[in-house]
Amino acid sequence: EPIADEEILNNNVLNSTNKSDNSSNRRFSTDNCDSLSDSRSKKKEVIPAENSNVQAEQKEETPTSTANVPSGAQEPKMELSKPEEDDEQKKKEDPDFCYKAPRKQKFEYNKRKDVILKTILRKCRRVLQDEFNEKTGYFANRKMQGHQFLKDCIQKFHDSLPNKPESLNLLFYLGAMLYPQEMSRGVDCFFECDKNERVKKRKFFRAKIQKVHDVLYRYSHEKMDYFVNVEELSYLYSIFYKRTVAHNNEDMYYMNGVTEIFERCKDTLKTIDIYV
């Protein structure tokens, strides 16, 4: 019996010690958690303090006023342009002073020969086109009109040309030069043939219209050779050349090009006994 009582006491002692150990372990774990949370909070507190120190140092480095800057090292100032004197003051100082408007710079033709020549040909078309519309009123009344209206206007302008050679087909080439698109659409009005040959004739005359258009707007020296070798085009150019008003206030390069084209057209017309 006493031995049994001792064993019961020993078991109670062991249980009590185990409980105390467990409670101590629990306290240790809670202490660790508290220490970790304290360390994290301290770090958060330290970071803004460091940032505030850096900002304070930067503020100390940058001068807040010009008083800290030495007098010898002042910042460069932008030099403002001096306002011009009034015209009245200039007139008082200099009685001969007077304001002159800037003269418009005269347009100078490019010195490249191909550019000069194609510019002259386009001007030839523009001058003849303006004269054509003044005499016939085609451009103002062309809407709601058929292709026959274009032919009638060309006939009217053709009849107004003085001393024109009757051997040349000027009606067709006038239309091809002045209004190539309208002429191409209504080309059937300018020739007569059977129905079987109408398609071939239409292609033939439209090809001629396209060649005249290419000379003006797809220039090359080969196409210029074609222009001066066609008698009708050479005669139309001679009409333009004789309009002296169209050549006023032009430079030397332009006049040389105009004269060169005219001489070539003149030689072509001489072969069929037409002198211009």
Image (spheres, grey):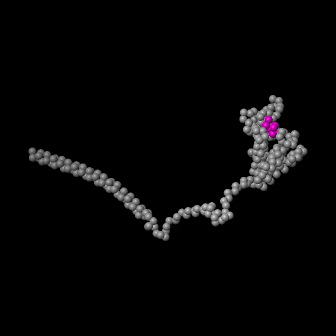
x then y, percent, for residue 79:
55, 64
Q: Is residue 63 magenta?
A: no
Q: Is residue 149 left or right of residue 21?
A: right
Number of marks in the rendered image: 0
User: Can residue 208 be seen in this snapshot?
Assistant: no
- Residue at 52% over, 64% down: 77
Q: Is residue 155 magenta?
A: yes
x then y, percent, for residue 275:
88, 46
As drawn, the residue found furthest toward the bottom would be 72
- Helix, strand or loop for the magenta stretch, by majority: helix
**What is the span of residues highlighted in magenta in the rendered image?**
152-158
x then y, percent, for residue 232:
83, 42
Q: Is residue 95 left or right of residue 205?
A: left
Above/below status of 96 relative to 197? below
Q: Give 85 or 113, whichever is nearer the viewer.
A: 85
As drawn, the residue found furthest toward the top would be 195
x then y, percent, for residue 211:
78, 42
Q: Give 144 or 194, whichever is nearer the viewer.
A: 144
As drawn, the residue found furthest toward the right would be 273
The quadrant of the rendering that contains the N terminus is: top left
Q: Where is residue 41, by image quadrant?
A: bottom left
- Residue at 16% over, 49% down: 13
